[in-house]
């Protein structure tokens, strides 16, 4: 690990030394990224979504311990039915996991009475019979469904609602409403994990994402979702979140945010053919309330079960090497384009 780390540092330093003069020469002619004016390109899945993380602190494990069952694709479902109600925590543990091994690793999904469905790594999860004393987790992979009974507990009301919305450019949004408030998962066609997650704590993508996606009035009585993934004259899309089932109430103070209903800013005019792409940071891990590359439920943060911000293997070195190759490739194209422009101006 130390050798790999030193190699990464040396590689980064060398890249900086080689790129600095060229970057200065290109800066005057290189087009600058602007908000997307065309279809958003599919982002690359984050490395952090598949790298094992340290287990949660031992004094917090009790709240999240349960009966782990291996459900395939490197995941276990940790089945619980305590005072919090039925829960199935979906954790990534790797293909080599076997009963008795540690399972307090990456959280990639959670189903409860507040959200009865989830998806991760090519599998879908549904908490069925959720209002009864004997709920069942159904896991479907490649059309094959398997059932895993949860421990028995108390019956309770199911307070969840969801809908899907196509937002263009090969992307879709899954909109959930629960007593915790609205939540939106952004998905790219062909990917098996969510690209970003928005909620009351982090209701909008940053400008660097290259597209518009935001929850409007996130703590209000009727939150909505707005998006714009294509440029030109494409209008801003908007839809409402599904309403909570009758008898269910938010567990937070409802406050209307009228400022969030203002029209979206117009995209800046383009200066070339370059368009911004959705940004998917490698190893970008933030606590609840921050943009995430995978689904990390709120309870997982308290347990320290969120994805680790620092891995313990050599994957960082591999990622750094791949990034360096991409940088040199871009540099070569940019220098070639600049040379052609200079040749035309001389002619």
Image: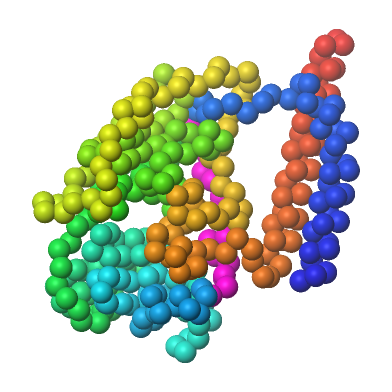
The percent position of residue 307, horizontal first and vertical second, equals 53, 63
Q: Residue at x 19, y 45 (%)?
A: 243
* Left or right, 20 with reference to 123: right
Residue 341 appears left or right of 237: right
For the view shown, which residue lies furthest in the bottom direction? 100
Residue 322 is situated, as x and y percent measured from the top left of the image, at 72, 53
Specify whether 186 is left or right of 284: left
Screen quadrant of the N terminus = bottom right
Q: Quadrant of residue 321?
A: bottom right
Span of residues in magenta: 39-55
Q: Residue furthest front?
A: 253
Q: Position of residue 34 (x, y in %)?
A: 59, 26
Residue at (87, 11) in percent of width and height: 346
Q: Quadrant of residue 4?
A: bottom right
The quarter holding residue 31 reads top right
Residue 174 part of the magenta-drawn span = no
Q: Is residue 334 above or below residue 184?
A: above
- Residue 40, can we see it? no
Count all numbered tags in the image, as a single digit: 0
Please give left or right for residue 150 compared with residue 35 in the image. left
Farthest left residue in view: 246
Query: Residue at image x 25%, y 42%?
Result: 254
The residue lying at 58 percent from left, 19 percent from top is: 270
- 57 vs 330, nearest the viewer: 57
Q: Is residue 54 magenta?
A: yes
Q: Is residue 288 visible?
A: yes
The dominant secondary structure in magenta is loop
The quadrant of the image that shows the C terminus is top right
């Amino acid at each position: 690990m130390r050798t790999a780390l030193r190699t990464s540092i040396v590689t980064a330093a060398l890249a900086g030394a080689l790129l600095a003069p060229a970057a200065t020469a290109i800066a005057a002619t290189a087009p600058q990224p602007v908000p997307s004016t065309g279809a958003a390109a599919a982002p690359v899945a984050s490395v952090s979504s598949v790298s094992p993380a340290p287990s949660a602190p031992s004094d917090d494990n009790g709240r999240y311990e349960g009966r782990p069952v291996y459900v395939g694709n490197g995941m276990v479902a940790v089945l619980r039915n305590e005072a919090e109600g039925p829960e199935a925590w979906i954790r990534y543990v790797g293909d080599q996991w076997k009963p008795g091994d540690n399972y307090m690793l990456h959280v990639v999904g959670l189903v409860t009475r507040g959200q009865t469905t989830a998806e991760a790594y090519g599998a879908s999860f549904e908490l069925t019979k959720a209002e009864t004393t004997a709920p069942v987790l159904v896991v479907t992979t490649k059309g094959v469904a398997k059932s895993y009974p949860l421990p028995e507990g108390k019956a309770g009301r199911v307070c969840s609602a969801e809908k899907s919305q196509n937002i263009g450019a090969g992307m879709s949004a899954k909109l959930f409403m629960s007593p915790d408030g609205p939540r939106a998962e952004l998905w790219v066609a062909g990917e098996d994990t969510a690209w970003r997650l928005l909620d009351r704590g982090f209701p909008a993508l940053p400008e660097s994402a290259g597209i518009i996606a935001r929850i409007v009035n996130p703590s209000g009585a009727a939150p909505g979702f707005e998006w714009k993934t294509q440029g030109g004259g494409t209008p801003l899309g908007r839809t409402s979140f599904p309403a909570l089932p009758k008898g269910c109430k938010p567990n937070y103070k409802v406050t209307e945010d009228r400022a969030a209903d203002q029209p979206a800013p117009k995209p800046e005019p383009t200066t070339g053919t370059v368009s911004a792409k959705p940004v998917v940071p490698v190893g970008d891990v933030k606590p609840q309330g921050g943009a995430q590359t995978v689904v990390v439920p709120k309870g997982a943060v308290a347990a320290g079960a969120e994805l680790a911000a620092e891995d313990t293997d050599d994957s960082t070195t591999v990622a750094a090497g791949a990034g360096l190759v991409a940088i040199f490739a871009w540099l070569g194209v940019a220098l070639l384009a600049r040379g052609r422009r200079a040749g035309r101006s001389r002619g």
